[in-house]
Image (tube, rainbow, N blue to C red):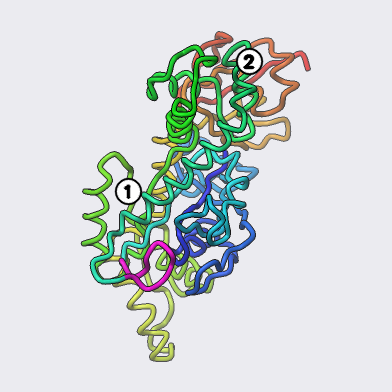
Amino acid sequence: MLVGLVGGPNKGKSTLFNALTHGSAAVADYPFTTIDPNKGVAFLDFPCACQGLGVACFPRYGKCVNGIRSVPVNVIDVAGLVPGAHEGKGKGNEFLSDLSQASALVCVADASGLTDEFGNPAPAGYDVSRDVSFVEEELDRWFGKVVARNSQRFSRAKGLGEIEQILSGVGVRESHLQEAIKQSGVAPEWAKWHERDFLLLAAALRKLSKPIVVAANKMDMPRAQENLTKLQQALPDHSVIAIAADLELALSKAMEKGLVEYDGKGVKITADLSAQPPVMKAALERLKATFEKLGTTGVQTLLHKIFFEKLDCIAVFPVQDERKYADHLGRVLPDAILLPKGSTAVDLAGAIHSDLAKGFLYAVDARTKMRMGRDEPLADGSVVKIVSAN
C-alpha cells in the first residue's frame, strides 16, 4: 500500500515526509522544493500478536518494543500543486502519474495560516480550507481527464471487470466502480454515459479509490489551534489531523543523538543540561515544553487514521510452524502484513506470494490449531499458517 503526500508549496509536505520516514528530502521555505517525487518508508505502530501469545517475537522488518509492532509502509511526496495545475500552471499536473497507485492521500495544509495556496505569504484572514479545496479540485480534474480519455473504451466494455482493467492504472477496483455508480447517480448502463456522467463518476471514483486525510501541519505555530478549528468546521466530512511535523523531526534527531528519550507519547531529556551550551539547553527545553503543550506530534495518529480507518486494514501474522508461531528458520512472528478487512486466507497467501495462492490447500489458525475455511474472513491480529501445494 502506498500513501501519497499532496498539497500546495510551503505547506510542510517535505518536512512531514522526513518526519514519517526519517529520510532526507530537501526542505526549504520557498515554493517547489520538491520537483521529483521523494519515496520512502514510514513505520506504522500497533499491538503485536506476541502480547497475547506470551512469546518474544523476531521481526524481519521494522521492530517490536514492549509489544508494539512497527511495520513499514510506503510513502511518496510529490511536487507542490497550485490552482490551475491541470492547465499547466506551476509544475503542471505531471506529478499526478506518481500518485496513480496510491491507496490513500494526505493533503497537507498550513494550519499557521502564513502561506496561501501558491506558497506565498498569505494575506490577513486567509481561509486555510483553500489548502484542501483546490487540491481536491485538481485531483478531480485529473481523474476526469483519465475517465474521459477512456470513455470510448468504456462503451465497448462487456462489463465492469473490463472497465476496472481500463482504470487499473490509477488504482480503481471493481468495487470502487460499483459504489461510484451508486453515489454519482449515473445510469448503470455505461453505454449511455455522457460527458456530465463521466465527470460525476470521476469525482466519486477519486474519493473512493484515493481517500484523503487532511494533515493540519505546523500546529506548533501561533494561531494554528484557531485555524485547526476553522478547518474542522469548514470540512465536516473530512478527517482533519493536527500535525507538528517539524517537532516530530526535531525530536527524532535529538533522540538519535542521545539527547532525549522519545517514544511518541512522552519526552525525557537524557542529556546533562549543565554540560550543554546555553543554546542547546534552551532548544531541548523548548522541544520538551512544546510537546507537553501539544500532547502529540500527530504522526502516528495520522498513519492510524489512514490504515485502520480510511483503508480499513487489519494486521495478520503469517507463520510456517503453528506450534511455535515461527517461520522455517525459527523466527517467531517474523512478519506482519496489512490486508483490507474481510480478507481471507487465500488473500493472505496471495499477499505473501502468488504461487502460494495458486497452490492453496488450506490454512490453520495458529492460536486454536483449527483449520480455516477457504473463504473465512481473517480477524485482526490473526496468526495463520498457509498450506500450499506450491
Callout 1 amino acid: Val
- Give the residue pinned by disc 2: 157
Tell me the chief SS of the magenta region: loop
Q: Is residue 115 magenta?
A: yes
Question: Could you say whether the residue bearing mark 2 is in a helix, strand or loop?
Answer: loop
In the image, 5 versus 206, the foreground residue is 206
Give coordinates of residue 361: x percent, y percent: 68, 10
| Quadrant (top left, top right, bottom left, bottom right) of the N terminus | top right
> Could you tell whether 50 is left or right of 168 in the image?
left
Label ID, residue 97: none
Q: Residue at (60%, 17%) from the top-left corner?
A: 155
Marks 1/2: CA distance? 39 Å
N-terminal-most mark, 1 or 2: 2
> Could you tell whether 339 is left or right of 197 in the image?
right
Q: Residue at (52%, 46%) from the top-left corner?
A: 70
Question: Could you say whether the residue bearing mark 1 is in a helix, strand or loop?
Answer: strand
Q: Does 104 appear above or below 280?
A: above
Q: Is residue 324 magenta?
A: no
Q: Which residues are magenta?
A: 113-122
Give coordinates of residue 68: x percent, y percent: 46, 45
Give coordinates of residue 87: x percent, y percent: 53, 52
> Could you tell whether 389 is left or right of 349 in the image?
right
- Give the residue pinned by disc 1: 240
Give coordinates of residue 321: x percent, y percent: 65, 24
